Image (cartoon, helix red, strand yellow):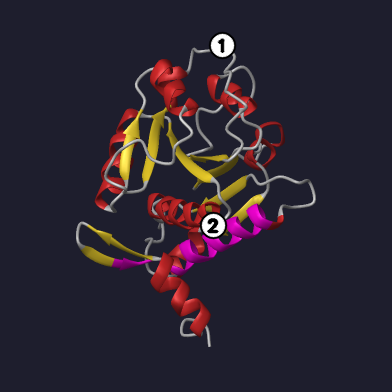
């Protein structure tokens, strides 16, 4: 009724099977449904007309794999609509940059990194889908700490009307200042960009609630559900 419904089975085969270091893996149900929820918001938009939002999946639940599936599905969608989709995976620590790079490369993505403002701006101004010659899909991984003190305005060319930028922010509950930071200036420079925030522990206090910064929740997968699925051990206190 569910898994073997013809339309869903074909969708899983086409979009949700990956080779991770030559091991075939199928997306878990929470990753599948999270991608579907994101697509619904992006296609239909909510009442506020935004395409941004938060994916709240408990820690260790495979958010990097989810990001890969998002990049794959969104690339195909925008290509069918004659748009070039460019993806930026934003982290806030060097070790996360290295980890994300390894995981994306293991799944077949070509990873670009930006070590300076100049490098990042050159990538932003390039409206081609791919910078390399292999034909493989690409993603740029950015360590936002490198730009933490950069307060300058970001100016992007307006001529690339067929370009769709997609920002995927890992650990979005940390290190993000919604005013005055380089990341905020980056978002302001491209108001049409899609912003998908990933977190296992979103901020809930009213003044800095994650959903107020990034938009309403696309999809949730809580700690207790992960315990039921057998992927997370229950914490026992003495």
Q: Residue at x 39, y 73 (%)?
A: 13
The image position of residue 139, as x and y in percent, is 39, 41
Q: Which mark is residue 80?
A: 2
What segment is highlighted magenta in the picture? 25-43
- Quarter of the image holding residue 92? top left
* Residue drawn where x is 20% and y is 56% of the image: 21
- Residue at image mark 1: 152
Q: Earlier in the sequence, mark 2 or mark 1?
A: 2
Q: Residue at 66% of width from left, 38% of height from top? A: 209
Q: Is residue 154 left or right of residue 100?
A: right
In terms of secondary structure, where does tag 2 sit? Answer: helix
The answer to which of 205 and 43 lies nearer the viewer is 43
Magenta stretch, main secondary structure class? helix
Q: Is residue 238 visible?
A: no
Viewer-closest of 47 and 236: 47
Q: Is residue 224 magenta?
A: no
């Amino acid at each position: 009724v569910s898994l073997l419904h013809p339309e869903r089975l074909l969708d899983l085969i086409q979009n949700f099977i990956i080779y991770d270091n030559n091991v075939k893996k199928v997306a878990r149900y929470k990753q599948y449904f999270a991608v579907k929820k994101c697509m619904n918001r992006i296609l239909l938009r909510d009442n506020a007309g935004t395409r941004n939002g938060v994916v709240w999946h408990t820690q260790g639940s495979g958010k990097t794999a989810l990001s890969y599936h998002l990049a794959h599905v969104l690339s195909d969608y925008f290509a069918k609509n004659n748009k070039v989709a460019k993806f930026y995976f934003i982290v806030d620590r060097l070790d996360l940059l290295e980890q994300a790079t390894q995981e994306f490369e293991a799944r077949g993505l070509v990873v670009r990194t930006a070590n300076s403002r100049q490098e990042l701006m050159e990538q932003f101004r390039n409206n081609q889908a791919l910078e390399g010659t292999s034909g493989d899909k690409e993603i740029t991984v950015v360590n936002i700490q490198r730009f933490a003190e950069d307060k300058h305005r970001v100016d992007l060319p307006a001529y690339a009307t067929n370009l769709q930028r997609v920002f995927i922010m890992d650990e979005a509950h940390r290190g993000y200042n919604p005013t005055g930071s380089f990341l905020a200036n980056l978002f302001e420079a491209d108001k049409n960009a899609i912003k998908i925030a990933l977190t296992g522990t979103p901020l809930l206090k009213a003044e800095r609630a994650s959903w107020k910064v990034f938009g309403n929740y696309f999809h949730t997968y809580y700690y207790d559900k992960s315990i039921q699925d057998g992927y997370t051990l229950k914490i026992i206190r003495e």
